[in-house]
Image (cartoon, grey):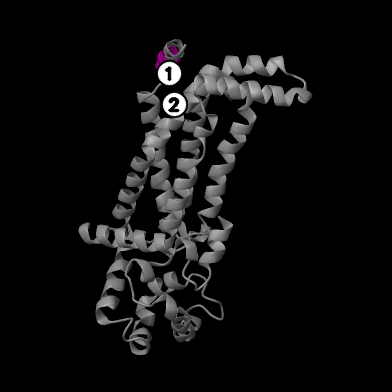
């Protein structure tokens, strides 16, 4: 995450490898805002819901893999008790692989696919929040002229803030566009046309939520906008608590063995999110809040629709049918 924040400080307009993603998300955001009447945050909500729906099959697969692992836990423990000596590690691993092969189980399927997908999605969201002029409003050749634009507006920025470097360039242009508009239109008439300037002003209005400027970075002194870091913490804690409870119910044995580690992770990630929410625009915090709420609802839905005991029973029946089918095929071959 720190690397993301450092890159976003540059005028380079993002990480090169993610620029196609910024462009794609920018076009989607432009379309949604056009359909929704410039409702920026409603578009973010729709983005988040769409992502979670795409992740739903992967999350269901994870739930089924966890149930299968739980069902095999007694057999796994039996093998582990059979080879307590570290020198027998190879024999233990071999029997474990044979067990997984017999049961048709791959523990790696629990993997981090959904998490990686969410990180990629987060990069796209950060791209359209940090670099809206290039990727949402679509000012042509903005990236190629960004240094010249920076040099043109910096004297005005000095009058507003002082002798400091502009750390989030496109956000600064968006926040104080009225101050920069005249010099931008005069110095870059092909880029900042009257049509594009109007689009920037409309977009800027959409970045206000209940009168709060969501391009701003939350600070303890800012009063009401502090609600976003706080809600990030609360919703992230809620998601971690729900996830931990479900994991314990899915696999009680593992839950007892890993109780302290799970508790540490449950507390560490929400407070990390709370800290980072001060380092990013409030709009990013808004996305995290919505994402956490949707994640909680999704976890509860999956747990209700695929309860551990029913899932394990169904997997046992499926494995029995599959095993008998293999045995019949062997008999036919003989």
Image-quadrant location for residue 61: top left
| Upstream in sequence: badge 1 or badge 2 | 2
First to last magenta residue range: 314-326
- Compared to residue 172, the image places residue 5 above or below, namely above
Q: Are marks 1 and 2 in contact (CB under 8 Å)?
A: yes
- Closer-to-camera residue (299/76): 76
Quadrant including the N terminus: bottom right
Residue 115 placement (x, y as % from top left): 48, 43
Whole-number angstrom distance, CA of label 1 to CA of label 2: 8 Å
The residue that label 2 is drawn on is 64
Magenta stretch prevailing secondary structure: helix
Horizontal side of residue 120 vs 89, given as left or right: left
Judged from this view, the residue extending furthest toward the bottom is: 186
Residue 267 placement (x, y as % from top left): 58, 39
Mark 2, other Cα within 10 Å: few <14 / some 14–19 / many ≥20: many
Residue 309 in the magenta stretch? The answer is: no
Mark 1, other Cα within 10 Å: few <14 / some 14–19 / many ≥20: some
In the rendering, which numbered label is found on residue 315? 1
Image-quadrant location for residue 131: bottom left
Horizontal side of residue 257 vs 9, given as left or right: right
Q: Which residue: 54% across, 54% down?
A: 276
Mark 2 lies on a secondary structure that is helix
- Closer-to-camera residue (34/239): 34
- Compared to residue 295, the image places residue 214 above or below, namely below
Q: Which residue: 53% across, 49% down?
A: 274
Q: Which residue: 38% across, 78% down?
A: 141
Determine if residue 251 is in view. Answer: no
- Compared to residue 93, the image places residue 30 above or below, namely below
């Amino acid at each position: 995450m720190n690397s993301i924040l450092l890159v976003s400080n540059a005028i380079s307009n993002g990480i090169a490898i993610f620029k196609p993603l910024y462009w794609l998300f920018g076009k989607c955001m432009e379309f949604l805002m056009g359909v929704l009447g410039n409702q920026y945050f409603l578009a973010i909500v729709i983005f988040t819901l769409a992502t979670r729906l795409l992740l739903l099959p992967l999350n269901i697969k994870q739930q089924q893999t966890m149930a299968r692992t739980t069902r095999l836990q007694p057999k796994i423990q039996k093998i582990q008790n059979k080879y307590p000596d570290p020198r027998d590690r190879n024999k233990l691993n071999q029997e474990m692989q044979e067990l997984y092969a017999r049961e048709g189980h791959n523990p790696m399927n629990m993997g981090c696919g959904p998490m990686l997908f969410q990180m990629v999605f987060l990069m796209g969201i950060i791209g359209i929040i940090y670099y809206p002029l290039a990727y949402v409003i679509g000012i042509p050749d903005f990236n190629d002229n960004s240094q010249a634009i920076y040099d043109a507006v910096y004297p005005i920025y000095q009058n507003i803030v002082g002798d400091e470097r502009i750390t989030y360039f496109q956000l600064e242009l968006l926040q104080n566009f009225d101050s920069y508009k005249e010099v931008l239109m005069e110095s870059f008439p092909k880029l900042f046309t009257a049509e594009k300037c109007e689009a920037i002003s409309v977009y800027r209005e959409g970045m206000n939520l209940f009168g709060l400027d969501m391009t701003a970075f939350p600070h303890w002194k800012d009063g009401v906008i502090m609600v976003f870091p706080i809600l990030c913490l609360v919703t992230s804690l809620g998601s971690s608590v729900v996830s931990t409870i479900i994991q314990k119910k899915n696999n009680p044995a593992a839950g007892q063995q890993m109780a302290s580690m799970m508790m540490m992770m449950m507390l560490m990630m929400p407070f990390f999110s709370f800290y980072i929410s001060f380092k990013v625009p409030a709009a990013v915090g808004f996305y995290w809040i919505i994402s956490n709420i949707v994640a909680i609802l999704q976890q509860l839905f999956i747990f209700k629709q695929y309860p551990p005991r029913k899932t394990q029973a169904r997997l046992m029946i499926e494995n029995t049918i599959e095993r008998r089918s293999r045995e019949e095929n062997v008999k036919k071959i003989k």
